[in-house]
Image: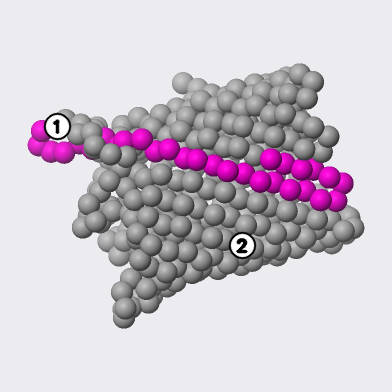
Amino acid sequence: MILLCILIFALSGTPARAADPFRTDLGGFVHQIEFRPDSVRVTRIRQWVSPVQIHIPLAGGQLDLHSGAMYLEQTDTLKSEAWGALNTRLRGTWSLSRRALLTLHAAFPTGKRSLDAEDANLVRTLARNDLNFPVKTFGEGLDIGGALSLANQVGHTGWSLGVGYLRKGAYDPVDGVTGYKPGDAFSVSAGIDRTYKHWVYRLSALGTFYFTDRQNSQVVFRQGKQILFQMGLLYEGQRLQLNFQVTELLRLKNQELIPPEGLFLFETRDSNGNDLRGSLEISWTPYLPLTLFGSGHFKYLTANAHPSTSPLYQGDAHLWQTGGGIKIHLGPRYRLLLKTTRMKGKILDDTIDLSAFQFQGGLSRQF
């Protein structure tokens, strides 16, 4: 059957833009986090990622290919590390008409899976929402999906609607655990915006329903539904661009299968915690080959419903991130990007100080 995948935000109510030219992007970044889990130890986690991206224009659309490799290192009382290739992702986007956009997506399992115990413990750290790692996993199974969205503009007001489906493939996440099949995801989105001169005010919502996770065909877990609300204010001048966004992500109750009863047990409170985010991004082009940009981000997380003694417990956290960079066009074909960010905050019920930095560099070539 035809499968549709979604992470759709509002499309500004405008027809799809023309495809970008053929382009390759090479680069890498390092993301390092440091915190003290107690008065003696210092935990440092460093993520190195070397992505490769290829953008290919097609008739009426565009094809994007993403892959790369990752090295992960943690130093505490001991040192542990893991490395390997990432999954390869293929994404195609086509304009069906001035108001309809079709997106198809596939993630091929070229990444490292079936992790041993040491690697698995290290990689699980990447999934923590309070640590803000850019890449969350080496790889999973074969995922196939896509999205269909509609958009229209009437005067200064635009709207968009989207629907999608993601079919998650089975894989063996850890040595000794076989036949794990993550739940598929079905999503619906809607957005509206209002344009006034160089300003755009935007509201959008995205709801996602997750089907059950299974292991060897037995239901083991269902992730809670998610509802995302986003408000944005954009300014697009000739040399100055501004993007301000506030996002509220509601994760509803999870369902866990507890043997031997074989029944879903509903947690009495939200097992995921609340996720509130704000961001401000500014870019300025003093003259055409050069663009300077800066950003500020804030994230506030509330504790989830697991007891503090549980390994699944995640306490209150708040994070501040600031950064900036430069983009230079080196002639008509090459573009150089340099960017650095710094993050400060508190995690685990605001009891532990956290600091992080990220440095990113990349080179694009247009053909």
Q: Which mark is residue 38?
A: none
Magenta residue check for 242: yes
User: In the displayed image of the protein, which residue is found farthest to the left?
Assistant: 260
x then y, percent, for residue 276: 49, 46
Magenta residue check for 132: no
Say which residue appears at 68% left-offset and 52% top-offset.
Answer: 281
What type is the residue that disc 1 sits on? Gly
Q: Quadrant of residue 273?
A: top left
301 on left or right of 17: left
Q: Relative to residue 59, is residue 137 depicted above or below?
A: below
Judging depth in this view, the residue of 347 and 18 nearest the camera is 347
Say which residue appears at 27% left-offset and 61% top-offset.
Answer: 117
Q: Which residues are magenta?
A: 233-261
Q: Which mark is residue 262?
A: 1
Q: Relative to residue 300, is residue 340 depicted above or below?
A: below
Q: Relative to residue 78, is residue 216 depicted above or below?
A: above
Magenta stretch, main secondary structure class: strand
Task: Answer yes or no: is residue 23 visible.
Answer: yes
Mark 1 residue element: loop
